[in-house]
Amino acid sequence: MTGYLTTHVLDTARGCPAEGLRIELFRIEGSDRTLLKTLATNDDGRTDEQILPEAEFATGEYELVFHAGAYLDATGTPPEDPRFLDIIPIRFGMSEPLHYHVPLLLSPFGYSTYRGS
């Protein structure tokens, strides 16, 4: 079995995939946080490529940073000052070479995530 990382972002307030949402992937090693990649979601709310493909996969601690505020601004969601949700960091560990799927269900006032398949 080989490891890789994917995501899927759904806008639960609008009932559609979250297109154009910027995502950053960081590797966490102790107190060091290293940016590995920046991507954006496509019209299906997914990235066009695996966030961390098999060739780059390594077990360890990671963080996905979802730029929800900019996405909400782009969709015309009425702004607040400051937005209730702007940057959503999700820190997680990958302990085995498996498919890790970290979806995000997003609305202007809440979000949820889980280990998907």
Image (cartoon, rainbow, N blue to C red):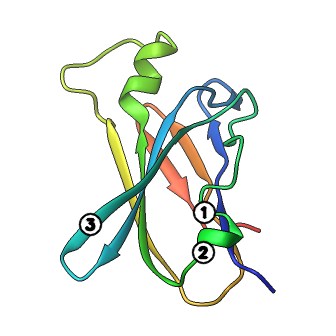
Circle 3 SS class: strand
- Mark with earlier residue (1, 3): 3
Amino acid type of the residue that numbered disc 3 sits on in the rendered structure: Arg
The N terminus - image quarter: bottom right
Give the class, few, some or many, for how many residues have Cα within 10 Å of label 3's Cα (few <14, many ≥20).
Answer: some
Residue under the point 19% across and 26% down:
82
Graded by Cα atoms within 10 Å as few (under 14), some (14 to 19) or many (20 or more), the crowding at tag 2 reads: some
Residue 33's tag is 3
The amino acid on which the numbered mark 2 sits, given as a three-letter code, is Phe
* Residue at (70% x, 66% y) in the render: 116
Badge 1 vs badge 2, beta-carbon distance below 8 Å: yes
Picture coordinates of residue 45, whole percent (x, y): 68, 36
Is residue 69 visible to us here? yes
Q: Considering depth in this image, is 23 or 117 the residue closer to the camera?
A: 23
Picture quarter with the C terminus: bottom right
Q: Position of residue 63 (x, y in %)?
A: 40, 63
Asked if the residues shown at circle 1 and circle 3 are in contact, with their CB atoms under 8 angstroms apart, the answer is no
Q: Residue tagged by mark 1?
A: 52
Residue with the mark numbered 2: 57
Q: Which residue occupies 76% across, 81% down?
A: 2
